[in-house]
Image: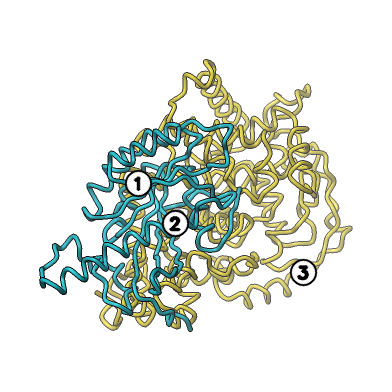
């Protein structure tokens, strides 16, 4: 871990100090015109197919959205930079005066991307305008080598489109009835509060992705909650193409309806492939009896007992079983416990961690539970379950998520590969 | 500091039935008088409680709302143990959810106590124009299978209170009769009857950890 990686995973104060030390850039020093530059960094908007322009198939680095670089703002804190409110496809502005933006800009500008470096940067949160690209790269969906990106994207998107055409060519009657029925029930209740996910065009896309994925993975098929896991991809990939302020459901639906067909198709296809990659790593969470989740819960319980014997003993004394509250934490990767923005920020780190969604997630869940240790100690069985079914995370910001991730990282450093560390001294240990 | 809520009996109830029939909304209507058209699917199991009065006794219902999807059966069926009542819910506007009632009964036979009280609940009775399951047919099926029967609407609240009241009252009757019988002839109850043989005012919350 280099110096960068180190402080970011340490205290928030250290990170803030770093930002204060960072050189300030004046707007004039960072006003760079990217358009047409062969070495321009990848940004989200460019990954969507061009609107059938003459040079859209010219290979090499695709033409960029013709956004001019914006002005430099005051350097943001790590907490705020990943969740700025108004970055859209036209936000431009990449490098700004923000050293983080510049680092991402530099990391993504090279012909062959250094994955380890991108992981280190991403651990601390990916700036909004680079997130879609960074995710595609971190997932191994987009090749690190620039010359292979366009052909790969074209091939994968076409492959998905072909599947969709074949699968749905003969109408709904030809589909697996039970599977289609379950997906049709669950798509409307996916992110019900989000205007984007209430848009009919997005819902049809979710249905197709989920059906195609499930039909190709019969050992698990569609399991409730997988629809949740699809939403961050749709959100991150589609968001750069949407107006900065969406308004209510009707306006969002109209904005999404107005998007170019090729853009929406690309968002859908990329979401499909990234969901596939994600689920490849956690497939036994969703097969019969969900052994992956059962295993994770056992590990989490052991971990909590080693870290906080008092809490472990209290839960035990109250008859609370981890499966009663942590099942959902594993099944939906804590997406039901935090809002979508927070999830997206968590995933920046998960993509950068080895086995982020299986192994590191256990540490995050343990940190999440331990966060409420004091409150839980005062509660009985029923109150504990009520509390954990609806943890007080409604007001969480990126800062809270980053603190959680830092705590999880600390636990991982302390307890990973040291299975008996503190085990004997923990009263809650079996 | 709660946990001090007093009750004479604590009954564990499970809510089961196909996905999307309205189990979670029945529960939220009964326990919080809330209905949410946009509720998310239940993952695994969720938990709520409410106390009611029967014959001047306080009965606390500890209700476990389960995910309807088949994949979750292995997880959710563990919650059947110790349950003294089950609300088996279908959607009166979706015939397949009624057809699957027999499969749910098999689930209960396999995993629940044999003397569990079961109530068949036809939910969404507000969808009159979409009705796919005739009331008489379901009523007859229930009678043939020894189930209580009611139609409810979590949306407009009709019969929700009654459904829970009725099943809890039935369980209470069985329990209090058993208690009388057992005190009269000192008969030993089978292990299956154990969960509903509830001493008055006990700290009973811990039973979920597997005392039965």
Q: Residue at x 50, y 72 (%)?
A: A407
Residue ID for mark 2: A328
Instruction: Classify residue A342 as left or right of residue B140.
Output: right
Label 2 vs label 1: CA separation?
15 Å
Q: Residue at x 72, y 57 (%)?
A: A102
The answer to which image quadrant residue B181 occupies is: bottom left
Q: Nearer the viewer, residue A150 or A243?
A: A243
Q: Nearer the viewer, residue A105 or B43?
A: B43
Q: Is residue A408 visible?
A: no
Label 3 vs label 1: CA separation?
47 Å
Q: Residue at x 61, y 74 (%)?
A: A12
Residue ID for mark 1: A284
Chain A tint as drawn: yellow
Expressed as whole percent of the image width and height from the top left, the position of residue A123 reads: 56, 60
Expressed as whole percent of the image width and height from the top left, the position of residue A201 reads: 67, 33
State yes or no: discs 3 and 1 in contact (Cβ < 8 Å): no
State yes or no: discs 2 and 3 in contact (Cβ < 8 Å): no
Report the chain holding disc 2.
A
């Amino acid at each position: 871990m280099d110096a960068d990686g180190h402080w970011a995973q340490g205290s928030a104060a250290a990170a803030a100090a770093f930002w204060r030390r960072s050189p300030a850039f004046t707007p004039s020093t960072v006003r760079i015109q990217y358009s047409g530059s062969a070495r321009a960094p990848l940004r989200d908007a460019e990954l969507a197919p061009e609107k059938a322009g003459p040079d859209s198939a010219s290979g090499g680095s695709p033409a960029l959205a013709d956004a001019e670089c914006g002005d430099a703002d005051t350097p943001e804190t790590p907490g705020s930079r990943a969740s700025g409110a108004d970055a859209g496809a036209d936000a431009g502005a990449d490098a700004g005066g923000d050293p983080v933006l510049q680092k991402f800009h530099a990391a993504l500008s090279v012909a062959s991307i250094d994955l380890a470096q991108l992981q280190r940067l991403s651990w601390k949160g990916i700036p909004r305008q680079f997130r879609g690209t960074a995710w595609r790269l971190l997932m191994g969906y987009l090749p690190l080598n620039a010359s292979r990106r366009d052909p790969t994207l074209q091939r994968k998107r076409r492959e998905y489109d072909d599947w969709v055409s074949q699968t749905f060519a003969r109408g709904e009657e030809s589909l697996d009835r039970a599977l289609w029925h379950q997906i049709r029930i669950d798509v409307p209740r996916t992110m019900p509060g989000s205007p984007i996910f209430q848009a009919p065009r997005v819902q049809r896309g979710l249905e197709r992705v989920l059906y195609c994925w499930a039909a190709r993975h019969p050992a698990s098929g569609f399991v409730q909650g997988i629809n949740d896991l699809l939403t961050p991809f749709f959100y991150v990939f589609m968001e750069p193409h949407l107006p900065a302020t969406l308004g209510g459901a009707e306006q969002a639906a109209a904005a999404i309806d107005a998007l170019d067909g090729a853009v929406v198709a690309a968002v859908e296809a990329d979401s499909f492939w990234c969901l596939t990659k994600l689920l490849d790593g956690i497939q036994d969470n969703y097969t019969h009896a969900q052994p992956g989740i059962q295993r994770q819960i056992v590990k989490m319980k052991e971990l909590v007992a080693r870290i906080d014997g008092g809490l472990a003993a209290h839960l035990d004394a109250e008859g609370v079983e981890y499966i009663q509250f942590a099942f959902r934490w594993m099944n939906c990767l804590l997406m039901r416990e935090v809002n979508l923005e927070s999830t997206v920020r968590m995933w920046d780190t998960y993509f950068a961690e080895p086995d982020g969604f299986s192994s590191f997630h256990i540490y995050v869940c343990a940190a999440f539970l331990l966060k409420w240790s004091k409150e839980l100690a005062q509660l009985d069985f029923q109150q504990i379950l009520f509390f954990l079914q609806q943890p007080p995370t409604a007001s969480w910001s990126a800062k809270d998520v980053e603190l959680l991730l830092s705590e999880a990282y600390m636990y991982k450093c302390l307890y990973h590969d040291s299975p008996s560390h503190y085990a004997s001294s923990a009263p809650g240990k079996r | 500091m709660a946990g001090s809520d007093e009750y004479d009996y604590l009954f564990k109830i499970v809510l089961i039935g196909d996905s999307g029939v309205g189990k979670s909304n029945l529960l939220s209507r009964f326990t919080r008088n809330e209905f949410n058209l946009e509720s998310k699917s239940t993952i695994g199991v969720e938990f709520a409680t409410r106390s009611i009065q029967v014959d001047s006794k306080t009965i606390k219902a500890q209700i476990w709302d389960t995910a309807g999807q088949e994949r979750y059966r292995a997880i959710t069926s563990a919650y059947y143990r110790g349950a003294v009542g089950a609300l088996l819910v279908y959607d009166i506007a979706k015939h397949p959810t009624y057809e699957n009632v027999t499969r749910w009964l098999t689930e209960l036979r396999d995993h629940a106590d044999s003397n569990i009280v079961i109530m068949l609940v036809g939910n969404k009775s507000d969808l009159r124009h979409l009705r796919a399951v005739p009331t008489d047919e379901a009523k007859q099926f229930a009678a043939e299978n020894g189930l209580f029967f009611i139609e409810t609407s979590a949306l407009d609240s009709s019969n929700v209170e009654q459904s829970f009241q009725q099943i809890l009252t039935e369980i209470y009757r069985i329990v209090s009769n058993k208690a009388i019988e057992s005190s009269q002839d000192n008969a030993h109850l089978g292990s299956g009857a154990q969960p509903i043989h509830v001493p008055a005012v006990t700290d009973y919350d811990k039973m979920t950890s597997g005392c039965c």
